[in-house]
Image (tube, rainbow, N blue to C red):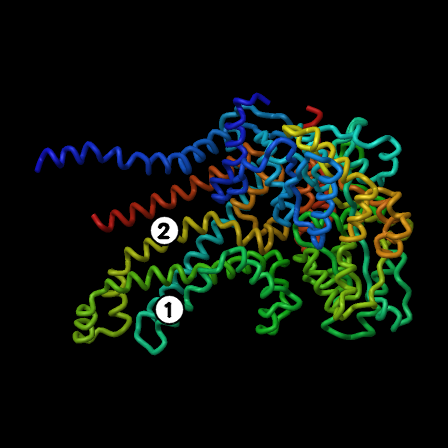
Amino acid sequence: MNPTRRPTVRARAVLPAVLLLACGGEEARDAGVQGAGTVVFKHFKVPGGGEPLERLLRRFEAENPGVRVVNETLPASSDRQHQFYVTNLEAGSSDFDVFALDVIWVPEFRRAGWLAEVGDLLSEADWDDVLPGPRAAVTWQARRYAIPWYVDGGVLYWREDLLRKHGLAPPRTLEELARTTRTVLDREGDPGLAGFVWQGRQYEGLVCVALEFITARGGAILEGNRAALARPEAVAALAFLRRLVDEGLSPPMVTSADEEATRNLFAAGRAVFLRNWPYAWNTFQREGSPVRGKVGVSAIPPFAGGRSASTLGGWQIGVNRASRRLEPARRLARFFGRPDVQKTLALEAGFKPARRSVYRDPELAREQPFVVRLEALLEGAVPRPVTPFYPMISQTLQAAFSAIVAGLQEPEAALRSAAIQIDHVLELEEG
Amino acid sequence: MRPVLAREERAGPAFVTPALALIAGVALVPMLGAFWLSLHREMPVFRISRFVGLDNFAFLLRDPRFLKSLGNTAYLTFLGVAIETALGLGLALLLHRSFPGRGLARAALLVPWAVPTVVSGRLWEWILNPSYGILNHVLGTDLNWLGHPSLAIHAVLLADVWKTTPFAALLLLAGLQVVPRDLLQAARVDGAGAARTFFHVTLPFLRPALLVVLLFRTLDSFRIFDVVYVLTGGGPANTTETLSVYAYKLTFSTLDFGYGSAVAAVTFLCVLGLSLVYVRLLVGRRA
């Protein structure tokens, strides 16, 4: 990018925001802190991980004399972080050198030319040690554009005590899950008890849930470079979600619920099943929690004859290609990819490591057995479509899935129309 | 006397220039820039950046999602402003009477307006929660306020009205102060009832304040963003998506800067058109 063009480009990215929201102020920065050898690390607010992260950065500084890391936190909302990165990177900003990327942003940022290649930071053996989902997400044409930091995957929680009370086993298929829910709800006869709660609000979380059900049925969102949404597998999966609401197995609130709304309901002891992320586990086991010691957890079960699937989530470490301190920035990225660093974060903040070898660590097995139990599930986690156009595709998916679960449109019609729109987006790449 | 005045007149522009330059710099230039951007196909991910004239605007007419969000915005604006103004007028008339604790009541009125919209949005999210929200509890209903396609937009409307009615009430209360007491007394002496007094004495004096309320609220409401963003994110199935939310998603979620700017530009033009109508009404009245 031509440096003299930068101000206009920056202005362009920021303009609609000024018109709409009169927002901003995020770019204000004290230029004085960036001496030679200072690396700026931008990331989201790490829940429960602020202090461990700070200690790790001091360790990095001790190992790399002369390098200082400035740690800058962004808002917790993933959308806001995306907005921050897009406006700044599009403007060619070099205000930050290393940053944390949601797994779904990597192809987009790579395509836009914002990420430095980092494949050589890890040896081939090290890359083989990385879980396949995140490895695929950061790879394009055999080149790597970010270092997998930690992973996440959707899981199913249930009330062990309620199931045992009624002599029921944890469900092995989704059909069984529906039957078990029905049985518990009927026998409990408590109008304050909900069945199966999941995230059905029009947002990214709904795409994650729907992907799990579509995969569980043997379907996919994309196949090759074409939408596979209009296929019977996807239609049946979404129809199943809608039926859960229609038949009262899921409360109506799921169509407006996000992670926290569903987690709170389950944590208050008012739901039998919950689809959520692993972070919820620790909140259930807290002192004073009504469901403490009463919760079971597993991967999302498949439909009969399908495959079990968790949607892959998690964060990667990218290096800003416009960074003026590329060398120390690359060192910091490599640091976060190291097994011992990922182990520290797993021990102290419950992060799920992206490196397989960490899961076999005896100390981790002792201190964080829950993290270690998740390995198999994370190993097989399904990524959302790995394409630079994912944000556009996701907008289409969110609207279509929301229309289905809210009962506004029939699954088949909604998915067929979404497939046409997605194919139209994907054609942009070919044309 | 004269030379001094002439000197002052000459110095005038020099004093005004910094302020004008500031306004131009922070408002006019970015605005024109956004218009310029809306004439481009600008998508950094696709490495696309080219001038397309009015293509983006032509496509708007064929974009059902845009038309839907325009409809939603208009619905929220017109219904919302009407309700806010009516409620605000009622509140202003009540608070204009003297009663014990009036100062406290006037201060309390301002609370919703003083709460940042994002905070009040979260507040309403809890109030409207179908399982443990207080609204369903109080009404004895089991309604899925934010998840039901036809309820969600009214839930947004409710949260917005709650938040902005105090603003209308405050401006109208100020407007009521200029109604001359002797005229009201004269009306009473002449035997006019409360309704007659209101329509023939109070309302004509209140007209400028009413127009100002309508102007401010319409402009503000047409750009409605935060309460929708917090409460529903535009869902379910885009039934609560407004122009600003759509423009935001286009620009920052899908990185379609050109088209996003076109939606933002149309929002601006709508607001401009509406404000011109109001300003005409205001000025026309005075002249």
Most distant residue in the bottom direction: B100
Res. A239 visible in picture: yes
Q: Which residue is mark 2?
A: B215
Q: Nearer the viewer, residue A53 or A279?
A: A53
Find disc 1 in the rendering and name its residue.
B106
Residues B29 and A37: in front is A37
Q: If you read the primary sequence from the N terminus, does the residue marked by circle 2 or circle 1 appear first?
A: 1
Disc 1 is attached to a residue of which chain?
A: B
Classify B30 as above or below B146.
above
Q: Is residue A142 above or below residue A276?
A: above
Q: What is the C-alpha distance between the residues marked 2 and 1?
A: 23 Å
Q: Quadrant of the C terminus of chain A?
A: top right
Q: Is residue A24 left or right of residue A158?
A: left
Residue drawn at point x = 79 percent, y = 26 percent: A141
In this view, the residue in front, B164 or B67, is B164
**Label 1 Cα crowd, 10 Å radius (few <14 / some 14-19 / many 20+):** some
Q: Which x, y percent locates residue A119?
A: 79, 29
Q: Which structural element holds mark 1? A: helix
